[in-house]
């Protein structure tokens, strides 16, 4: 009889944890980028750029930090830019705009001058990106994510 009560208590505890966890997963799925804007862009030498972005995030879940942010921007299938971004911490249960400082190095055949020339004929459909980032929760647990061949056009339309 005591063993049966222990098993029922354990099952009830596991069920409660699962239900609580499912609610957290749903809140995590509801995290949204609500806006983004380029605040400034500055050349760094002949092949580099730094940029400051403002990214709006609606976060109904727990606090997390995005770190190890890096990626490659492709122009018509060729490597255009390798970029990195500083870590950013998103507060729990908040809607806010976060600054994101980025650094970029232009790919082999491109220079800052060629980029300025391309700006006249800019078509977002010509660009895709690969992104790698690590999400670290406040308690220390983390998970890496990799996204490949994301059309920039889709990111701009999501704004």
Image (cartoon, rainbow, N blue to C red):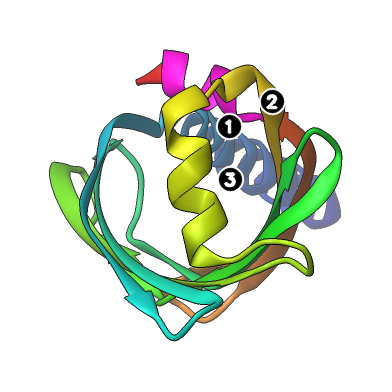
Judged from this view, the residue extending furthest toward the top is 157
Q: Horizontal and vertical percent for residue 109?
A: 77, 63
Q: Residue drawn 84% across and 47% down?
A: 78
Q: Quadrant of residue 105?
A: bottom right
Q: Residue drawn 32% across and 60% down?
A: 63
- Circle nearer the viewer, 1 or 3: 1
Q: Earlier in the sequence, mark 3 or mark 2?
A: 3
Q: Horizontal and vertical percent for residue 3?
A: 84, 55
Q: Is residue 12 above or below residue 154?
A: below
- Give SS at disc 2: helix
- The majority secondary structure of the magenta stretch comes to helix
- Left or right: 153 in relation to 52: right
Q: Quadrant of residue 61?
A: top left
- Give SS at disc 3: helix
Which region is colored magenta? 151-157
**How far is mark 1 from mark 3, CA to CA?**
9 Å
Q: Residues within 10 Å of mark 2 (few under 14, many from 20)?
A: few
Q: Earlier in the sequence, mark 1 or mark 3?
A: 3
Question: Which residue is at the front of the view, 115 or 58?
Answer: 115
- Left or right: 158 in relation to 60: right
User: Which numbered disc covers residue 17?
Assistant: 3
Location of mark 1 (residue): 22
Location of mark 2 (residue): 126
């Amino acid at each position: 009889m005591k063993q049966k009560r222990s098993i029922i208590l354990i099952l009830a505890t596991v069920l409660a944890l699962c239900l609580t966890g499912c609610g957290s997963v749903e809140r995590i799925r509801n995290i949204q980028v609500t806006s983004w804007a380029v605040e400034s862009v500055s050349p760094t030498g002949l092949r580099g750029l730094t940029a400051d972005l403002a990214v709006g995030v609606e976060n109904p879940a727990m606090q997390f930090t995005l770190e190890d942010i890096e990626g490659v921007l492709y122009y018509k299938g060729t490597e255009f830019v390798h970029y990195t971004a500083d870590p950013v911490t998103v507060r729990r249960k908040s809607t806010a705009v976060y600054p994101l400082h980025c650094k970029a190095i232009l790919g082999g055949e491109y220079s800052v001058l060629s980029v300025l020339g391309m700006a006249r004929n800019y078509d977002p459909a010509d660009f895709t990106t690969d992104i790698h980032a690590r999400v670290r929760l406040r308690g220390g647990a983390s998970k890496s994510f990799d996204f490949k061949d994301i059309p920039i056009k889709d990111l701009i339309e999501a704004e």
